[in-house]
Amino acid sequence: MKRNDKSLRRREPMTDTMLLMTITIAIFFAMYFAAMAIWGGGFLRWQRVFDMLNDNAALIIISCGLTVVMIGGGIDISVGGVIALVVMSCVVHLNAGGSILSAALLAIGIGLGFGLVQGFLISYLEIQPFIITLAGMFFARGMTTIVSVKPQKVAHEGFKLLMKTKIEMPWLGYIAKKGNLVPARMEIGVVVALVIVVLVFFMLRKTKLGRSFYAVGGNSNSALMLGVNVKRTRFFSYVLSGLLAGIAGFVFMMHTGAGNASNASGAEMNAIASSIIGGTLLSGGVGNVLGTLFGVMTLATINAIVTTSGLRDPWWQEITVGALLCFFIVLQSVVLTLRGKGGIRQMIPAWMKLPGKAEAAKPVEMAEPAEGPAEEEAGE
Amino acid sequence: MAELMKKTKKANKKNLGGYAQLLVPLLSILLIVVFNLFRDPSFFSVTTTTNNLGNTVLAGNLISILNSASELAIIAMGMTLVTAACGGQDISVGALATIAGSVFVKILRGGEITIGSIVVGFLACCAVAMLFGAFNGTLVSVFRIQPMIATLVLFTCGRSIAYWINGGATPTISSPLITALGSFIPGCPIPTPIIIVAVMAVLLALLFRFTTLGLYTQTVGVNQRAARLNGISPLVMKLVSFMLLGVCCAVAGCIGVSRLSLINHETMLLEIEMDAILAVAIGGNALGGGKFKVSGSVLGAYAIQALTTTLYAMKVPSTDVKAYKAVVIILIVIISSPVVKQAASRLWAKTRRLTAAKAGKEVSA
């Protein structure tokens, strides 16, 4: 039994993962339903959900990569820079007469290149992941302006068509004021993002590699003794993150269609925040990519609520997101500490205790005490 | 405790007095100096010019490096302490410095600017920064959240809070006193920020000399449990380190405001958190906590600024500097990586054995 001070005591890492994820999903739905009840309007339409997905498809993809890296006990802050570089290079490539296929290959190539180099330096030369990926971010951002300082717009006809192509879902549409049916629209990028979420989910759940990410992140020494190739596992986590960043860059380009040096600025921190809200611990070994998806959606919902609720001053958005983040990390810390001490069972009133079913009932109970600290944090 | 300190000192003496870790930052600076000597020796010339206020002042690339690295050096000092005590880094320093600068501007805009109001403003922004530092510190020590995640909160919303404090995009303050704080005091040829860094360094050195802060911080960083069993509270040490970093941020924020006589919450000290962490790493401090040397981080800060200034002198566009900087950083960390170090020391031992064997043969012959 490792009684470490830094990492919270983890006896059943998988259950922690499930617990944190369930809390996030419960809070997301609670928040969304509250928004539906209070503001109605746009929140009642499916299109609002799809808008949030359309805007955040690239963020979902890099968050998946970051979740894997964080489960493995590392960090990758180069992803935002890689997106900017990919978008800029692909736009320049397309405008110079390249085809869509070669642009996609270029995107994947840049992402893989970053992943391979960073993974090698971090896992085999044992350099701090923060420093290497920070340098990676600097390099990517610098290269973006070297490729082109001026913002570039895609002029490629085929690609413009690809950008405009949207999947229409009439059965999720709504009747507009004029009486005509407006179908719900979803961009192709969202499909890519959701497919990646599902793939990474099954990779983490079912494959040997996926399980070794948890093993390495939880305790690399034990993993080594159990015969897991720790270095190679870490290496793969960064390669995967780089690859996904490349794909995210392409998806980002399909959404905006323009290369700009300030593209995706701060995306890495948003991705880290989403992963944390989704229940991934930076110390490693705990996390779930499904939670990450809901983490992104929670952030998007908060932003939508702030805009809808009439807090028009420009500073409220970030302050609310900060308060929300603060609430989530404090909640996670409290939940995990209480679990370590076996305190939750004692906190639950006796009449709510169901022998044997306590595990399933827990998340529901946790959502309630959570409201207290939320108000405190919002006051700061 | 005094005995323990003595023992540590003795142990340190054996190990080059702990100065071995300064090798990396010194080597990086040396590398940049040698590169510049070959490139253009006039890079190092220091001249005196008369600025537009009629003062005789020093000018030149060296002065510019020392001057513009001031904020970075001051923040790196605090960051070293946080890194040593918590084994993690604070990524909210830029936001925190902006908040402090905002408070400074807010108070100075409230009335006439005199030396008294500047002192009051400075003390107020120190207090605010310490409060926010304590907030970060509480998240880290009481709730046991990793520093990077805990400070992500302020990183996300800090600049917005600074915006909120003043309620406008770029409030300005104009006064000869503020200009003196940001550039030159009349009659003194040395830029004031350099003097402020020197004062901060002396204060910190005195703090380490006359209190057990350094030793306790290191103890907590090396092993919290052991520290607690010895009666040192890791909770308090972490909180103190974050509050000291808050003070450093406040000083940096005031310098930043005085330089421009205005505050821009979006661009002020942008990405300084990354540079500060880099300075700590180049300074040879373990990012996982424990042993530390503040002087290493300060040297690291100057190395980073020297690199930037060199790139500017080579007419590299300011937007492209990052890419070249990244390459140099990667080279430095590869050289100082444990694997490469081990390989180098193995090689060194091998050559020594070989030469010894050779010498032995010669003697026997």
Image (cartoon, coloured by chain):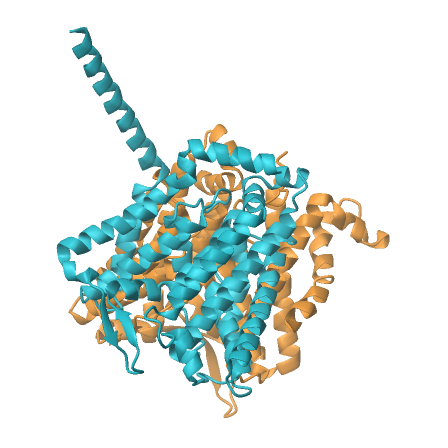
Chain colours: A orange, B cyan
Seen at 36% across and 50% down, the residue is A132
Quarter of the image for residue B220 reads: top right
Quarter of the image for residue A189 reads: bottom left
Up-down relation of residue B131 to residue B205 (above or below):
below
Seen at 30% across and 63% down, the residue is B65
Instruction: Determine the residue located farthest toward the front in the rendered image.
Output: B187
| x and y, in percent, of residue A159 in the image | 26, 71
Up-down relation of residue A123 to residue A188 (above or below):
above
Is B250 placed left or right of A354 in the picture?
left
Instruction: Determine the residue located farthest toward the bottom in the rendered image.
Output: A178
Quarter of the image for residue B195 reads: bottom left
**Frontmost residue, B25 versus A340:** B25
**Frontmost residue, A33 versus A170:** A33
Instruction: Determine the residue located farthest toward the right in the rendered image.
Output: A351
Q: How many marks?
A: 0
Seen at 35% across and 45% down, the residue is A119
Is B335 placed left or right of B114 in the picture?
left
**Frontmost residue, A278 versus B328:** B328
| x and y, in percent, of residue A288 in the image | 53, 52
